[in-house]
Amino acid sequence: MIIKHMGTKTVKDEQTGEDKQVPVENDVSHLVNTCAWSGSRIQAARKLEFTYTQDPRDPNWPVYVMGIGETVKAYSEDGDLQFVGNIYTTERKTSASIISVTCYDNMFILSKSKTTRKFTNMTAEDITKSVCAEMGIKVGNLAETGEKLTFIANEKSGYQIILMAYTEASKKTGKKYQSMMEGDELDVIEKGSLIEGLVIDQYRNITDSSFKESIENMINKVMIVDDKGNLIRYESKDDQIQKYSMIQAVYKESKNKNTQDEVKDIFKGPERTGVIDCLGDYDALSSYSVEIRDIITQLSGQFWIKSDTHTFKDGQHTMKLEIEFENIMTKEKVDNSTKGSNNVNKASSKGKGRRSTNKSKKRKVEIHYVG
């Protein structure tokens, strides 16, 4: 990964002849020791962490300063922009002559900046544009829903509002959505879009893998009661009860909440998780899906990436992918007392995601034999 720091340089103004400062991208990759680039479905912003050497005691070693709030960009070896963000933390360790830098992309701004707004008869994509305009975030490709919504967002972050809008739209369209930054632009994609041309295979690029199943958090029966605790009815997953035994929860009905939706969220089935360690590919990001062929751990088929961590060290790019077995959308609920929805003509969704449409001929897959 190529790391560039947005600095300034002094040039002569052609008209006045006076010195002026202009922005410049300084390649600091030769100073970087280790680098990790990561993201998760359940976290808003992607993170870029790296360490670089600085030793003022060595006159032969360049002294380069990066400050909090400044911009860092990261590129693939082919020159494709992968990350744009700001430095939020720096830490200096004198004995090791190392500076640690932590950056987040602009989703961090959306997750920390709050507002109060009323949205009336607006689609999720228009709500997203409005929020981004208020918070100074550029907009890229947004999945089109064609669903007009009305709700109040009271002291919610920009990220929460976007989630609220697409959560409500998802109930109408039946699609799942995820917001993410592509460079300095916000995209909303159809979650789970398949990364074309990438196959993670035990005989080619997997170095380690694991698979876990658990029913510790299972809930397969819900007792529904009124506000006085009187039984209304039961809902259950009888096939799970027969196979695993019964574990019950209680739900108290509320006038401001949709009982069916609330109960649906209470049910928890068997949890299955997988972790893959393999050679790195820049397109393998959380919220997309990927084809995996690993017979030993029974991870064979199409799976959804819950989290990804790409590590760059000594010229090698490796990654750890946490895998989900179903396409799960991160949601934010809207207070039922403040929302409304109107159907309009359904728009064709254009949210497949830029990563999912990469041509396989561009992909460079190294062969790594294991065993």
Image: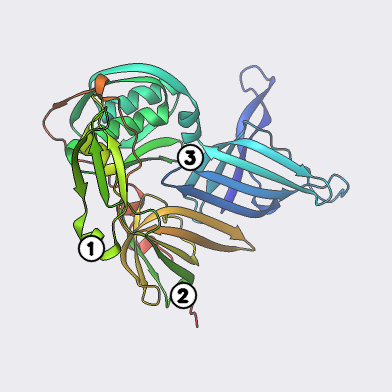
Could you give the CA–CA distance between mark 2 and mark 3, rounded to whole angstroms?
32 Å
In the rendered image, residue 288, in percent from the top left (x then y), is placed at: 35, 52
- Which of these two is toward me, 48 or 9? 48
In the rendered image, residue 82, in percent from the top left (x then y), is placed at: 48, 47
The circle drawn on residue 367 is 2
Q: Contact, CB < 8 Å: mark 3 with mark 1?
A: no
- Quarter of the view holding residue 363: bottom left
- Quarter of the view holding residue 218: bottom left
| Residue under pointer 3 | 45
238 with respect to 25 (left or right) = left
For marks 1 and 2, give the one nearer the viewer: 1
Give the amino acid type for the residue marked by disc 3 in the picture: Ala
Could you give the CA–CA distance between mark 3 and mark 1, rounded to whole angstroms?
41 Å
Indicate the quadrant containing the N terminus: top left, top right, bottom left or bottom right. Answer: bottom right
Going from the N terminus, do you reach mark 3 or mark 1 first? 3
Q: Residue at x 43, y 28 (%)?
A: 137
Q: Contact, CB < 8 Å: mark 2 with mark 3?
A: no
- The reply to whether residue 239 is in sight is yes
